Each structure stands twice: as C-alpha cells, then as structure tokens.
Image (cartoon, rainbow, N blue to C red):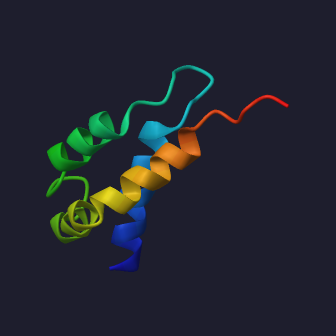
Amino acid sequence: MRARLFAVIDTLDAITSDRPYRKGASFDVARAELLRVSGTQLDPTAIGVFVAEEATLREMVDLKCAVAPES
C-alpha cells in the first residue's frame, strides 16, 4: 500500500511542478486528473486517502509552489 500512496503523491508533485517544457498545473487540475485515473492508473483506496487528506496536501503544494521573496 505504501507504494500505491507514493504513486499518488508522486503524480500530484509531477502535475503541480514546473518543467522546462511547461508550467506546473494548479492543485485543482491535479486533483481532477487523479480522480479521473482512479481505478485505472492509480489505486482507488490510495485516492481515497488523498481525498481524506486533501486540505493538508493542498497546503503542501501551495508551500512548494510559493515564490520566494527576493532579498
């Protein structure tokens, strides 16, 4: 089960992270994609944990994506 949870978190990070070829998507876009692939690419039980912890995960993505103030 740990690997299945990791797959969900890794996918969330991949979708919300900037890449050289695209900007990271919002948490809401990532959430929609995770729910869309639940049961096919990602374990539905792990997606259930994601939904249950959505507020915490949203906060973590917001912190990760925040722009550091210039000094």
Residue drawn where x is 47% and y is 48% of the image: 61
The quadrant of the picture occupied by the N terminus is bottom left
Q: Above or below — where is 50 with respect to 27? A: below
Relative side of 61 to 55, left or right = right
Tell me which corner region of the image, top left, top right, bottom left or bottom right, holds residue 19.
top right
* Residue 69, horizontal then vertical, whole percent: 72, 32
Q: Above or below — where is 44 with respect to 30? A: below
* Residue 57, horizontal then vertical, whole percent: 39, 57
Residue drawn where x is 45% and y is 38% of the image: 16
Q: Above or below — where is 56 with respect to 27? A: below
Number of numbered labels in the structure image: 0
Q: Is residue 64 visible?
A: yes
Tell me which corner region of the image, top left, top right, bottom left or bottom right, holds residue 55.
bottom left
* Viewer-closest of 3 and 70: 70
* Viewer-closest of 50 and 8: 50
* Residue 2, horizontal then vertical, whole percent: 39, 78
Relative side of 60 to 49, left or right = right
Residue drawn where x is 43% and y is 53% of the image: 59
